[in-house]
Structures are given as C-alpha cells and as structure tokens.
Amino acid sequence: MQYEELAAGLEHLPGATAVRLQARTVMIVANHVIYPIRYAKTDVPVTAARLRRATGLRADLIRRHGPEPMQGELDLGLEELEEPEAHRDLGQLPPEVGLVLVAYACSMNAGVMRLEWGAAELRREDRYLIWHHHEPLTTGPAMP
C-alpha cells in the first residue's frame, strides 16, 4: 500500500518514472529512487531504524544506491571477498541513480507517528541505518 500511495503522489512530477522492484512500483524523481520503508511500529526516532535482514532487495538497494559509507572499511591487506550478487530487480535501475528513503513509524492503532526522508547507509554488522541526512516530513491533509 505504501508503495502505491507514494507512487501516486509522485507520478505527476516532471520527469518522474515508474519502476517495478519486487512487484512494487517505486518512482525515480530527479535521478533518485524514492523508496518507502517502515522502520518501527512504535514512536521511536528514525536513528533507531534497523532492517530485519542484511540481505534482499532493501539491503542491496541501500548498499548500491545509498550514500558512500562515512567510515571506510579497514583494509587488512587480505584478498577481498567477492561481493554477493545483488537482487536481480536492481538491474532495472541505472547505476548512477541515488536513493532517498522515506522512513516512517506507524501502527494500526496509532497511525503514522513519525515520517522522515533522507539518505542512509546500511551498517552490515548490525543492520542499522546510519543517516547522513534526514528531515521530518509533515503529515497533513492531502493537497488538492
């Protein structure tokens, strides 16, 4: 549902393009994939956001199209491990496309408690999102 709602709200922007990723429609606007992600069912800050899994479409999308990690990996002089192949649907995205996450906390009882947008990297060891930039979005009445 969140994918369709976001796509419907963005499809009228100039240059917006719809792309299907894992049977969901997401939009590319101004050379950025706009991707919604529910990070919590309780009212916690977006800085507590963590993915359930370190693999799959979301994780691969963030790693490949999100910002460069703030802290480089430690080079021990060992042969680099071969990076696993990315989710097949990511082949539909141009390599230069960036990623904007629309992160929200919501529940059936409370509705949307927090809504933010920004850019984050995925910390591999614990699946937490490390936000490079995030700002709250307002949840008001729909514009006519």
Image (cartoon, rainbow, N blue to C red):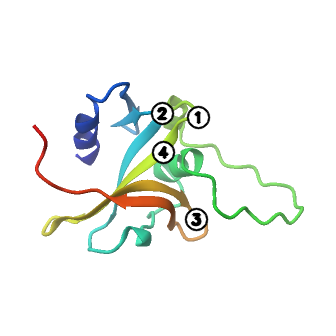
* Callout in the foreground (3, 4): 4
Asked whether disc 3 touches disc 2, contact meaning CB atoms under 8 Å apart, the reply is no
* Amino acid under disc 3: Arg
Secondary structure at badge 3 equals loop
Which sits in the foreground, 139 or 38?
Answer: 139
Give the residue at mark 1.
Answer: 96
On residue 31, which mark appears? 2
* Amino acid under disc 1: Glu
* Amino acid under disc 4: Leu
Quarter of the image for residue 143 reads top left
Asked whether disc 2 touches disc 1, contact meaning CB atoms under 8 Å apart, the reply is yes
Crowding at dot 3, Cα within 10 Å, few <14 / some 14-19 / many 20+, comes out as: some
Residue at 55% across / 71% down in the picture?
126
Quarter of the image for residue 49 reads bottom left
Secondary structure at badge 1 equals loop
* First of labels 3, 2 by sequence position: 2
* Callout in the foreground (3, 1): 1
Asked whether disc 3 touches disc 4, contact meaning CB atoms under 8 Å apart, the reply is no
Which sits in the foreground, 53 or 114?
Answer: 114
* Mark 2 vs mark 1, CA separation in Å: 8 Å
Asked whether disc 4 touches disc 2, contact meaning CB atoms under 8 Å apart, the reply is no
Give the residue at mark 4.
Answer: 99
Crowding at dot 2, Cα within 10 Å, few <14 / some 14-19 / many 20+, comes out as: some
Residue at 44% across / 33% down in the picture?
30
Q: Position of residue 120 (x, y in %)?
A: 50, 57
* First of labels 3, 1 by sequence position: 1
* Mark 4 vs mark 2, CA separation in Å: 9 Å
* First of labels 2, 1 by sequence position: 2
* Amino acid under disc 2: Asn
Crowding at dot 1, Cα within 10 Å, few <14 / some 14-19 / many 20+, comes out as: few
